[in-house]
Every structure is written in structure tokens, then in C-alpha cells.
Image: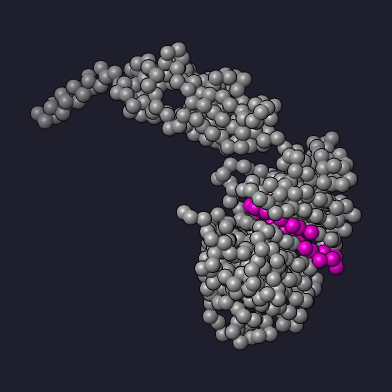
Amino acid sequence: MRHYFVLFIFGILLAASSCRTDFDTVASSGDLKFSKDTVYLDTVFKNIGTSTYNLKVYNRGKDDINIPVIQLKNGLNSKYRMTVDGMNGNNGKIFNNVTLLAKDSLYIFIETTADITDANPTDFLYTDEIQFDSGSNLQKVALVTLIQDAVFLYPKQNADGTKEKIEIDGKEVDGFYLDENDETNGNELLFTNDKPYVIYGYAGVPENKTVTFEAGSRVHFHEQSGFYVSNKASLQINGNVSTTKKLENEVIFEGDRLEPEYSDVPGQWNSVIFADGSTNHSINHLTLKNAKIGLDIRNQDATTFQIKNTQIYDCSNYGILAQNAKINGENIVINYAGLAALSCVYGGDYKFTHCTFNNTWSGGQQFAVNLSNKLTGATPETNPLIQATFNNCIIYGSNTNEFNLDKNANTAFVYQLNNCLLKFGSTSNPDYQFGTDTAHYNAIILNENPKFFNLNLNKLNIDNTSAAFAKGNQTFIIPLDIIGNTRTSPPDLGAYQNKDFPKK
């Protein structure tokens, strides 16, 4: 009897389901709701695709509806592309008879690739709109993208289809040497501030040539790209103090993805490499971001590499990696690196004054500063560290020990820290006796918080509550800080003169 009853109930349910009209739709009536009324696709360079952005469309009603058409206003001529709930429609431009169930929603994903000639010539905005239905039921969502013009530099295509190559460290890589045929003012190899530059592959500076970057120039590197300064070649970066948030006089090196979500992503491009034997380099007011190794400095000639008023952020390996180099650094700030903010290996000759080396990379054992007179695989494997002097500097970070000495006792290893704020845990190792070893350490402030303004935003400014406030030695003072403020006496440690933080 129970068996017949179950069959009876099942028959009723089956009959009811065959009469359901859940998936019968009514025509849309212009009552769709949207997650936003305008989709802003962030700034991109001409002919480089944007990231994918989304729009959510809601049916708040009780009926399943049919939307006769979802389309781009410019139709098949639009530079925008869409998918609607995973469907590509007609070339991603037009979608007919889209069903949207009651109390449900659908996703539209949007992207574009447009040329500067497609944009409005007065504001460089490329616009379109997504249209839902038509006539009195028409609803719209605007699409807006800023297209930025640029000079593109890239390896030429050979007749056999391969790309032009240059040799770095004995290996051929996609790249090219800058020459009079490039848009860098010919033999002067001058990067101007007229337009940003986008580099694919490695841009090389030929022997006996000098590349110069004027104040306000911008260079963007594509994935796996970089800059290579060859033997006997020189690099000059002539940035200056900026007076606005636009950093109008700063020279900036960064990746070619301009969307905000990429602004602090490490490892988007390779490095600026200074080859063994390169010469006479000078960097002033450079901001470098998102590389694997920011400045990769090999054994240059006897000239001193001047690095001043320079900021290096978010590098997946090193901010500065120097191998048997000769560097004078003033007002340098490095933050967030996968291995070390500053790593000076295989000896060399270094002097850093009023610099801030901080490393907040999470996990593992990273350092703010690493010094070594060794290099595995080199011949010989040790080389004298003639000097490594740090004056009025901050060496800090999120790990217990942010200062590392890796030395071979049979080779010269000369170093000294004067009036520095340093983070380091307690140890019996004789190399790290900061309070008693006056041959190497003088006036060290140990394990006190410099109270940087905002590490996540790479703002390593300090105020007068910092442990670095007025702790510097006047003997080593650099009169102006990294952004042109006059230092007081006694000076603060690090690259920044103290200022009151903005009110939150």
C-alpha cells in the first residue's frame, strides 16, 4: 500500500512539473539594475589590452525576463569586447535574446584594445556604452578608458621571423641597441619627457655611448624586459625635485601595466643592468618600481657610480645588487625586496649617507642590507671589500635581523656604521657587537622603531616622534633631503627630514 502511495505522490509532482512556467519569460521592461552606471577601464597605452573589468546586472522582479539585445553602442566597430555570462555573442559586441531569471543576476566582462587615434583628441578618452534593450526600455552603462600615447621601442623582426638579439652574460636575449633610428634623438640617446616610452625586450646602450634621461621622463618595461648598459657605456639620469604629486620632474621606471592593482606588484619586469666595465654613471631623482632587480651593478671601471635622491620599491629579488662596484649613495630609499633591499657582494667600495633601507617582505629570511666579499662560481670566489660605510642611515624591516655580514676572513672586509638606526636581535657573534665594537659601529640606535608614515604605500617619511629624529651626526649631513627639504642640525637619520604627518 505504501508503495502505491509513493507512486501516487510522484505522479502528482511529475504532472505539476510538466505544467510549470518557471522558464517562460516576459519581455524586459527597462527595470534592470546595475552594479555601476559607468565602467572605468584604467589607463592603458595605445594598442595594449586592458585588464578585464566586470559589470553585474540584476533582475529584481518576480518574473524571468528576456532581454532582446545587449550590445555596444558602436556595434561591430567598437574597440570594446564583452562576454555575457560566458557567451561571446557576435564578436563580443552584440548579444540577442538574453534570459535573466527572476531575483537573479548575470556578469558582463569587458576589455578593450584601442589606439590613440580612437580616443577623443582633447582628453584622450575612448568611450562607448553598453545598451540593454531599445526604445522606451533602453538602459545604458557608460564605458570609459584613457588611452595614453607612447614611444614603443622593441627588437626588430629579422627576415627569417626571429627577433633581434643582444648578448647579456654570455646568453642571447630578445633585445636591441639604441641608435639613431630609434626615437631617442639619435646619437644623443636622449629620453625626453614629451611622451612615455614602452620597452619590449632589453634596450641596450652601445659601447662608448651615453644614454641620458631628462627630468620628467617616464619609461615602462614590458614583462621580461629591461635596460642594459654595456662595457664602456654610460647612463645619466637627470631628474630633479618635484613640487606636485604628479612628480613632474622625477624620472620613473616601472612596468607597463598602468592599472592601480599593478602599482605595487613585484617582478613585472627584469632589471637595469650595468655591465662589467661600464663607466661614469649618475642617477638623480629616479623612482624605480616593480622590477626583479632594480639596479644590477657589475664591476664597473674606476669611476664612482653616483646615486642620489632615488627611490626603489617592490622588487622581487633585490632593490640594488652590486658586485665589486664603486658607489656613492645619498638620500636613497629602498623598501620591500624578496632577498635584500641592498646587497653588496664580491667586495667593492661603497659609501651610503642619509639612506633608508627597509625590508618588509613577508616570509623567509630577507635583509635590508647584506654585505659580502664572496661570490659563488666567480674566479676567484673572494674579492676585497675595500669599504662599506653607512652614515646617518636607517636599516630596518620586519625580520629580527636586517643587517647581514657574509665574509671570508682571508680577504679584506672593511665596514663601518656611524649614527645609524639598526634592527638586529641579540647575538654573541663578535661581528655584531654594536655597543662595544667601536672599530665598526659608532652611535648605533638598536631596535627602536623609526615609525614610518605608511610602509604599505612606500611612504618612509618620519615625524618628530621617530627614534630617528635628530639622531644624526652633523659631520655627515647632506644639506637637503630626498625631496628637497632643508635638514636641521642635528639631522634626522635616513633620507627624509621629519615633517608632521597629514591628519587622517
In which quadrant will I find the N terminus?
top left
Colour scheme shown: one colour
Q: Can residue 421 be found in the magenta stretch?
A: no
Q: Can residue 296 be found in the magenta stretch?
A: yes
Percent of width and height locating residue 404: 63, 73
Q: Quadrant of residue 415?
A: bottom right
**Outermost residue toward the top?**
135
Q: Work out whether residue 287 or residue 28 is closer to the camera in this orientation and state it.
A: 287
Q: Residue at x 87, y 42 (%)?
A: 186
Q: Quadrant of residue 91?
A: top right
Q: Residue at x 76, y 67 (%)?
A: 328
Q: Residue at x 54, y 34 (%)?
A: 40
Q: Work out whether residue 4 or residue 341 is closer to the camera in this orientation and state it.
A: 341
Q: Work out whether residue 9 or residue 273 is closer to the camera in this orientation and state it.
A: 273
Percent of width and height locating residue 306: 77, 63
* In this view, 72 is above or below 308: above
Percent of width and height locating residue 164: 81, 43
Percent of width and height locating residue 172: 79, 50
174 to the left or right of 333:
right
Task: Please indicate, yes or no, whether residue 61 appears anywhere in the rendered image.
Answer: yes
Q: Residue at x 22, y 20 (%)?
A: 16
Main secondary structure type of the part rendered in magenta: strand
Please state the extent of the stretch shown in magenta in the rendering: 282-306
